[in-house]
Image (cartoon, rainbow, N blue to C red):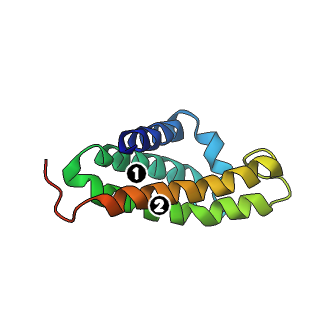
Amino acid sequence: MTIAFAILMIVAGVVHFCIPETYAPFIPVWMPAAAVVYVSGAVEILLGLGCLFSKTRRAATLGILLLMIAFLPLHVADALKESPAIGSHAIALVRLPLQFVLIAWAWYIWRKQPLQAQL
């Protein structure tokens, strides 16, 4: 379950670099879209890699948890737009609960890790 989550995060981060135009419409106009897309992709890759190692897993999953919470308002705003960036209102409304699944998944992995994880 943890490895699947790590792979999901790494793949999502790589997609930020391969198809950045997919994520740019989610970014508020007052933010530098390209920088936010690339930085968030790099962070997702690093945190996903951190999930693979017991010494960094707790910190990495906490980071993902916080990152997913930070992304939540972007997905709410997208669902409320007349023309959602994700494509349609139906897809936006399906994507929104998925964000809560990712938050819960990160929380579950974070919570089951001991404070001082060892190899």
Horizontal and vertical percent for residue 119? Answer: 13, 47
User: Residue 29, located in which quarter of the rendered image?
Assistant: bottom right
Disc 1 secondary structure class: helix
Task: Name the foreground residue: 70 vs 8.
Answer: 8
Q: Nearer the viewer, residue 114 or 42?
A: 114
Residue 77 or 102: which is nearer the viewer?
Answer: 102
Foreground mark, 2 or 1, reads: 2
**Residue drawn where x is 72% and y is 50% of the image:** 94
> What secondary structure is marked by label 2?
helix
At 80% across and 60% down in the image, what residue appears? 81
Q: Is residue 30 visible?
A: no
Q: Position of residue 108 (x, y in %)?
A: 41, 59
- The residue at 33%/55% (across/down) is 60
Left or right? Give the position of 93 relative to 98.
right
Q: Is residue 77 left or right of residue 55?
A: right
Going by the image, does 87 lie left or right of 73? right
Q: Which residue is mark 2?
A: 67
Residue at the image point whose x is 29% and y is 43% from the top: 52
Q: Is residue 61 visible?
A: yes
Mark 1: few/some/many CA within 10 Å (<14, 14-19, 20+) = some
* Amino acid type of the residue tagged 2 in the rendering: Leu
Q: Quadrant of residue 1?
A: top left
Where does label 1 land, which residue? Answer: 43
Residue 95 image position (x, y, % from top left): 68, 51
Residue 93: image x %, image y %? 75, 54
Image marks 2 and 1: residues in contact by CB distance under 8 Å: yes
Identity of the residue furthest to the top in this view: 18
Residue 7 quadrant:
top left
Count the numbered circles shown. 2
